[in-house]
Image (spheres, helix red, strand yellow):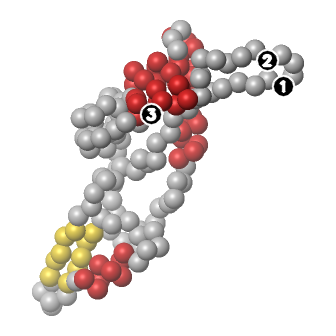
Amino acid sequence: MYRIPHLKWDGYAVYTNTPKRRGMRGYGVNEVAFAIESNMEIAAEKLGIDPVELRRKNLLREGEPMLNGEITHSIGAAECLDRVCAAIKLNEQGASEGPWRKGKGLALGNKYSTARAAYCGARIRVTENERIIVYHGADAVGQGVNTVIAQMA
């Protein structure tokens, strides 16, 4: 969602004889989005600028790299931000008094939560005893991809 030009991470892979495991289906996305957006609000306040403008300035644009280095080919985040702000009339907060107050807020979120590419590949190896081993990058999330790959091989 946002440009982060000075990001650095380290990772490693381990080959085992067990299936790969990881969190799935949005694991941790909400918590991370809350932390990022809370920090955007704090940064905007400290910089003395509008929080929407800070978000707009830092949004990814078409042709820019995402966190994993992939280049974005289509991203409508800025247009979406503008349309949402207009639709909810974000600048028209209205006055509220008393212990219960009403207000409007804005936060962005992104489900691109992995270092994996948006595409996957496969490598096939035939062993000396004519066994076929298929290495593939498809995520197994209950749809039977490992079975399908074995059937295709």
> What label sits on residue 100 in the rendered view?
1
Q: Which mark is residue 96?
A: 2
Q: Is residue 27 above or below residue 63?
A: below
* Quarter in which the N terminus is drawn: top left
SS of the residue under disc 3: helix
Q: Are marks 2 and 3 in contact (CB under 8 Å)?
A: no
Earlier in the chain: of badge 2 and badge 3, it is 3
Q: Amino acid at mark 2?
A: Ser
Side of 124 where 145 appears, left or right: right
Q: Secondary structure at mark 2?
A: loop
Query: Residue at coordinates 34% horizontally, 45% vertically from top-left?
Result: 10
Estimate the spatial distance between the alpha carbons at disc 1 and disc 2, rounded to whole Å: 8 Å
In this rendering, which labeled residue sits more in front, label 1 or label 2? Answer: 2
In terms of image quadrants, where is residue 128? bottom left
Task: Say which residue label 3 marks.
Answer: 80
Pointers 1 and 2 in contact (C-beta within 8 Å): yes
Q: Nearer the viewer, residue 20 or 35?
A: 35
Q: CA distance from mark 1 to mark 3?
A: 30 Å
Disc 1 packing (10 Å; few <14; some 14–19; many ≥20): few
Q: Position of residue 106 (x, y in %)?
A: 58, 29
Q: Could you tell me the amino acid type at mark 1?
A: Trp
Front residue of this view, candidates 48 and 4 = 48
User: Is the C terminus in the top left, top right, bottom left or bottom right quadrant?
Assistant: bottom left
Chain-order first, disc 1 or disc 3: 3
